[in-house]
Amino acid sequence: MESIRAYELIKETFLRRTFIWVVHLIWFGIYGLFWLLFLPSNVEAGQFLFIWSGFFLPLALSAGILGDDIASGRICVLATRPFWLGQLYLYRLLGLSAQGAVHILLAGGLVFVLDTLMGKGTPNNLGVWLLSSWLLFNACAALSTSLSVVVGRSYNSLLTFFGVAIVYLLLDVLAGYWLEYGTAEVMRNVIRHAGLPFGLLHGLAKGDYGKYSLAVGKYDAVKSVACVVHCLILTAAYAGAGILVLTRRPFSSERQ
């Protein structure tokens, strides 16, 4: 029974809106146009996917992911049944993660074909870029899904986007004033390790950790594994916060 419920909720998340399929098609069209018109030669092929698949895609897919259930009152029906609302969160997030994995794999195949045909870009490290994109996708999806618990309808995606943009913009602006005091560096480290892991995963994909001693080929195994684990812990922390808020909201009493 539980496995059936999990399957149905994950499938519902995967297929929940018609426009989601339009989003996927638009994203693939953007990849193709970028490779045809704008991609410089001799650049890492996965860098563009890292931002479009890892950050913008989960925002589009997670719009109203739980806010729609709350606004429609469906969450109240679920709360009156022997059903832990944390499961709804987990299955929604798993559905998003599955969508991200399928999309990023297909995008990787498309990029590889475009690079092969056009000779633009260097797909040698494409697999690592795809892994980094998926890890960033999960972290962003977890953050946006948690915001969807408290933000109505589809505004969780907008809040995530503007929140991330404002935080990083303010950090750049204030860095010039606080750099001599070391405060800017402290803020960078806090955001680097507690915020969305743009810098960590970008370094992983580029192989920046290969300069350390325990290197396996271009990549440092210990640093790379630590980076992946850190991103998974960060995703779990974002998800845990959302589950905590969701399960403490009095939906059953509201329905009564």
Image: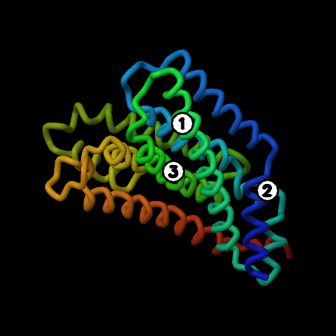
**2 or 1: mark nearer the eye:** 1
Q: Secondary structure at mark 3?
A: helix
Question: Label 2 near label 3: C-beta < 8 Å?
Answer: no
Q: Residue at x 78, y 53 (%)?
A: 15
Mark number displayed over residue 228 = none
Sequence-earlier tag: 3 or 1 = 1
Sequence-earlier tag: 2 or 1 = 1
Residue annotated with mark 3: 134
Q: Position of residue 70 (x, y in %)?
A: 76, 60
Q: Residue at x 33, y 61 (%)?
A: 225
> Whole-Å distance between the Cαs marked 2 and 1?
29 Å
User: Compared to 210, does 92 lie above or below?
Assistant: below
Q: Is residue 244 left or right of residue 179?
A: right
Camera-nearest residue between 5 and 160: 5
Sequence-earlier tag: 3 or 2 = 2
**Quadrant the N terminus occupies:** bottom right
Residue annotated with mark 1: 52
Amino acid, disc 1: Trp
Q: Residue at x 33, y 50 (%)?
A: 192
Residue annotated with mark 2: 71
